Amino acid sequence: MRNIKNNEIYMVRMLLLVVVCIGLLPIQMRAQKNSYIIPGEVWKDTDGNPINAHGGGLLYHDGTYYWYGEYKKGKTILPDWATWECYRTDVTGVGCYSSKDLLNWKFEGIVLPAVKEDPNHDLHPSKVLERPKVIYNKKTGKFVMWAHVESADYSKACAGVAVSDFPNGLFTYLGSFRPNNAMSRDQTVFVDDDGRAYQFYSSENNETMYISLLTDDYLKPSGRFTRNFIKESREAPAVFKHKGKYYMLSSGCTGWDPNVAEIAVADSIMGTWKTIGNPCTGPDADKTFYAQSTYVQPVIGKKNAYIAMFDRWKKKDLEDSRYVWLPVLIKDGAITIPWHEKWDLTVFDKQKKSDKQKK
Ligand code: DGJ
């Protein structure tokens, strides 16, 4: 009887010790390591928190990938005056994560924070800040961020620019403007092999996509631009280059709701662009897997390997919007983005092997 009691006390003590030890472990050690990309699932950072980087893009710099995106925190609201579904969260800023393997991401902080004290500032919480992208300028050594800067009612339609000496910030906000005197909403920036950079932006009330060459310092439009996809209402542009040709993935214009994606190709970045069709395949491919394009990232060190990044918006709880990352597969010049429940970068090696076996 006494032995049983002693055993019980021992067990309880051991249990308490385990609980205390787990509590003492650094958060990083408690967080699980990600071995796969699981589209649509909550994706945790190395601290164990859900990654918060929506409408974002990647930058590869000195062996590290940086992921920048809208840090959407708190309640999603539909303003009283809304005549359409302009659900929004207060602006918190642009979040940044870093990774060596594209699977495990360390939170680097809010690299462009909201400006709470000035209600007229572009970055005041009452405004809208979307689709930030960062490029590196080799000549100036600066990291340059372009983003869609909006008033709460989406009438401002401007591009905002910020700059930093480091990829993980802080970024200094330089201001906003309508590039080439034209509205600028969904947008991305792309650096070509020759070091020239371009902004792609939905303009003319989202009806026409502008492609604008930036100045050598990447801080302003150079004045050279073309109008593309005229009256085709494309948004969410994501651009990449493969074997000398330029590709642009984009969505239609249906607010936060999904629609069919399209990919277009051009021999010259300023156009002419030719639409190829919907690259997505598999279940819900006609709804872009209930997501919307934001960026395409080449996998460094692998040939013909690109990752298409999409956002699966949750319009009534924007903070909980999810990421749908999928491999872009290129076979005999045809580009597809097939659905995968879960995958890792070996998908590109398997693709290469099956191409070889066919020859
Ligand atoms: C679609 C855009 O792609 C998003 O970035 C956001 O602006 C929503 N529209 C707002 O409805």
Image (spheres, rainbow, N blue to C red):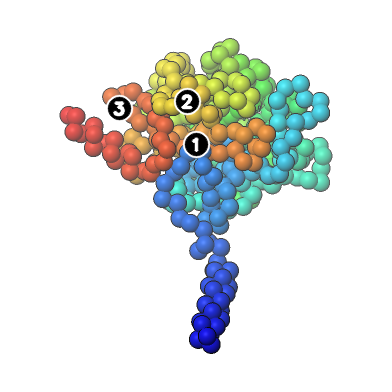
Q: Earlier in the sequence, mark 3 or mark 1?
A: 1
Give SS at disc 1. Answer: strand
The quarter of the picture where residue 22 lies is bottom right
Question: Mark 3 or 1, which is nearer the eye?
Answer: 1
- The residue shown at (41%, 27%) is 282
- The quadrant of the picture showing ligand 1 is top right
Which label belongs to residue 56? none
Query: Disc 1 residue type?
Result: Val
3D distance between C-alphas at marks 1 and 2: 13 Å
Give SS at disc 2. Answer: loop
Foreground: 292 or 141?
292
| Image side of residue 220 versus residue 124, left or right | left
x%, y% of residue 303? Answer: 32, 38
Q: Earlier in the sequence, mark 3 or mark 2?
A: 2
Residue 144 visible in the displayed image:
no
Query: Within 10 angstroms of label 2, few (less than 14), some, or many (20 or more) residues?
Result: some
Q: Find disc 2 in the rendering and name its residue.
A: 284
Query: Disc 3 residue type?
Result: Lys
- The residue shown at (60%, 45%) is 52
Question: Mark 3 or 2, which is nearer the eye?
Answer: 2
| Image side of residue 315 versus residue 200, left or right | right
Q: Find disc 3 in the rendering and name its residue.
A: 331
Q: Find disc 1 in the rendering and name its residue.
A: 324
- The residue shown at (55%, 34%) is 311
Foreground: 219 or 72?
72
Foreground: 302 or 71?
71
x%, y% of residue 39? Answer: 48, 39
Query: Within 10 angstroms of label 3, few (less than 14), some, or many (20 or more) residues?
Result: few
Task: Work out which quarter of the rendered image holds the C terminus and state it.
Answer: top left
Query: Disc 2 residue type?
Result: Asp
Query: Within 10 angstroms of label 1, few (less than 14), some, or many (20 or more) residues?
Result: many
